[in-house]
Image (cartoon, rainbow, N blue to C red):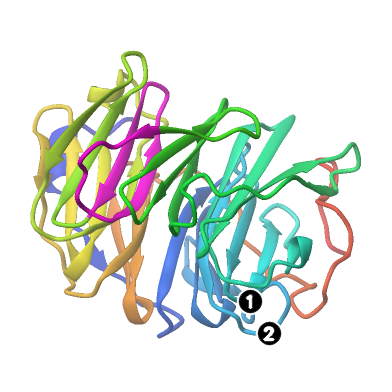
Amino acid sequence: MTETTNHRDRAEWRAIDSPTDKTLLGVVETVRGPYAVGEDGVVLARDETGWTTVIGAGPATDRNRLTCVAVTPDRERCWFAGDSGALGMYDTTSGRKYDYTAPMEKTSTWEAIAVAGTPDDERLCVANGSGELLPIGFDDRGCPQYGAVTEPGGGSTITALAADASACYAADTSGGVFATADEEWVQIGVDCAQVNFHGVCATDGSLLVGGGDGMLYRYDRACGNWTPLSVGEAAVYAIATDEHAAGDDDGVRAVAVGESGAIIERTPDRGWHGVDSPTDADLWGIALGATDVAVGEDGTILEHETRHMHERTTPRRSENDDARSNGGRPPVSEATDE
């Protein structure tokens, strides 16, 4: 049975016991529940019993910080990236880790990552602090194929990436937002933004970009129009929408998180409004699902129950956690790491 909006509004965000005191910088919702990444290369997973560590030292076992995470269209695999060119993938259905660190000999810090396309045609994109964007496709064996590096913002740091079935979107520290449906990036905004951008979220009909001074910008793709929204005073670091909710973009629940524990929610009946937060820690990541999850400084994990939990299988610790893999991503039929 679906919970009503009023019930969701009454539910409170709660601080949850965390298996780490390392700052967590991103979180995604998968078919096996939420996964979070952060400092020291930690990857955490949540099941019915709580949060556990599934990867303790990053894709290359060198404990480089993981700054970002993205989930594949089928929500079975997590891609993550970070310091010293760290790049890897974790298959939640098999418990197998894959290491692709330093693609094209790029060893600077990856700041953002996104996966576009469909389960049959995935396209990965990662961006670094020098404003470089590296597109990654996959061959018939599932092995990554690296494309040409571009700098859509002329070298400004790309702080956030998002994607949908048709395109990738990038936001930078100069108030620029870019889009691509192939390998050519085109600037689509934002004129006179006057704030640094930190987070971006793509939905079927619009794009949400979060930045400093509590500013959100909504891009209506049908008309190519930007609308600024003031949702508070705290910088917005991450945004997520409930992709499984029914209705148009204005009727879909969205949550933004940011500086000093700020949580701002959009519901169909109230629009954007601040909600009580149990923490003053900066929140760097947000994912919505049966249980909403926000993550941040010093291992902070917040949860917000939104509907009855779906049946999930307990994530298992990767047997390859300490092994560098040279193979491609596993085929769909592969179910174990034995």
**Residue 89 colored in magenta in the image:** no
**Residue 197 colored in magenta in the image:** yes
Q: Is residue 219 left or right of residue 135?
A: left
Image quarter in which the N terminus is found: top left
Q: Residue at x 44, y 59 (%)?
A: 157
Q: Residue furthest front?
A: 154
Q: Residue at x 20, y 59 (%)?
A: 235
Question: Is residue 68 shown to the viewer in this render?
Answer: yes
In this rendering, the count of numbered labels is: 2
Amino acid type, mark 1 = Ser
* Depth check, front residue: 106 or 99: 106
CA distance for labels 1 and 2: 10 Å
Image quarter in which the C terminus is found: bottom right
Q: Which mark is residue 62?
A: 2
Where residue 254 appears, as percent x and y from the top left, is: 27, 39
Q: Is residue 325 above or below residue 75?
A: below
Q: Residue at x 33, y 20 (%)?
A: 224
- Judging by the rendered image, the residue that carries numbered circle 1 is 84
For the residues bearing labels 1 and 2, Cβ distance under 8 angstroms:
yes
Where residue 108 appears, as percent x and y from the top left, is: 61, 72
Q: Residue at x 75, y 56 (%)?
A: 94
Question: Is residue 306 shown to the viewer in this render?
Answer: no
Q: Which mark is residue 314?
A: none
Chain part drawn in magenta: 188-211
* Depth check, front residue: 45 or 226: 226
* Depth check, front residue: 299 or 4: 299
Q: Is residue 303 left or right of residue 326?
A: left
Amino acid type, mark 2 = Asp
Where residue 197 appears, as percent x and y from the top left, is: 31, 52
